[in-house]
Image (spheres, rainbow, N blue to C red):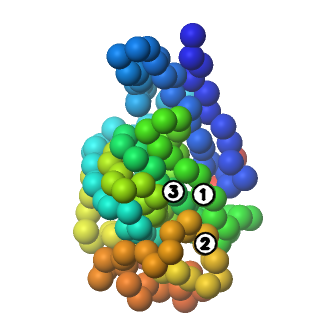
Amino acid sequence: MPEFRVEETPLAGLLVVWPAVFPDERGFFLEPYRVERYAPHGIEVLAQDNHSRSGRGVLRGLHFQTDPGQAKLMRCGRGSIWDVAVDVRIGSPTYGEWFGIELDDVDHAQLYVPIGFAHGFAVLSDVADVMYKVSSPYDGGTESGVAWDDPDLAIDWKVDDPVVSARDTGGTRLADFDWSATVWQHRPS
């Protein structure tokens, strides 16, 4: 029987989730979220579901919400993406460090991105459907982000010549970001 498991990453609080997948000759079945399994790991994301579809080379990010923040449980239901989270928690020992993982429709891994991380992804397949749950409803007034191409972060996005929205072009470098509107900060566990 397939086993559900949660793995820690080098960035405290950022988790990789491997849901139990039940394949057979017809395809597969999995539960992308079940509160009894996820909550003991601190993963409680019930406020809103989001779904995006993007083509090869599209890069979305690096986004986050300021007060009250927004946690995300990311998965790729179709295709393949390179999913990246950057620690932007004030006072965190890993502030400015990033973690990346390929999420796809084969392994079905998920990335739990807690409050205090900027998040983005790049599409590696011809098309990708990305589905994710968030901990608070979208609020345009708290939407923020840092430059996806910040040279200090030096993120390897795994795509050449990414397709980026006007909103994501010319973002603020992490070193120049004004954190005065952000109330969350690193809280050691």
Cα separation between marks 2 and 3: 11 Å
Cα separation between marks 1 and 2: 9 Å
Query: Of marks 1 and 2, which one's residue comes earlier in the chain?
Result: 1
* Circle 2: residue type: Ile
At 35% across and 52% down in the image, what residue appears? 128
At 41% across and 88% down in the image, what residue appears? 170
Q: Up-down: is 159 above or below 76?
A: below
- Image spot of residue 6 (x, y percent): 61, 33
The residue singled out by tag 1 in the image is 100
Q: Secondary structure at mark 2?
A: loop
Q: Quadrant of residue 3?
A: top right
The residue singled out by tag 3 in the image is 83
Q: Is residue 186 visible?
A: no
Q: Is residue 47 visible?
A: yes
Query: Of marks 3 and 1, which one's residue comes earlier in the chain?
Result: 3
What is the crowding at mark 2: few (fewer than 14 residues within 10 Å), some, or many (at least 20)?
some
In-image side of 189 versus 112 (left or right): right
- Image spot of residue 48 (x, y percent): 27, 45
- Image spot of residue 124 (x, y percent): 46, 58
In-image side of 113 versus 32 (left or right): right
- Image spot of residue 161 (x, y percent): 46, 79
Residue 155 badge: 2
* Circle 1: residue type: Gly
The N terminus, quarter of image: top right
Q: Secondary structure at mark 1?
A: strand
Give the camera-side residue of 18 and 102. Answer: 102
Contact? badges 1 and 2 (CB < 8 Å):
yes
Q: Quadrant of residue 93?
A: bottom right
Q: Secondary structure at mark 3?
A: strand
Contact? badges 3 and 1 (CB < 8 Å):
yes
* Circle 3: residue type: Asp
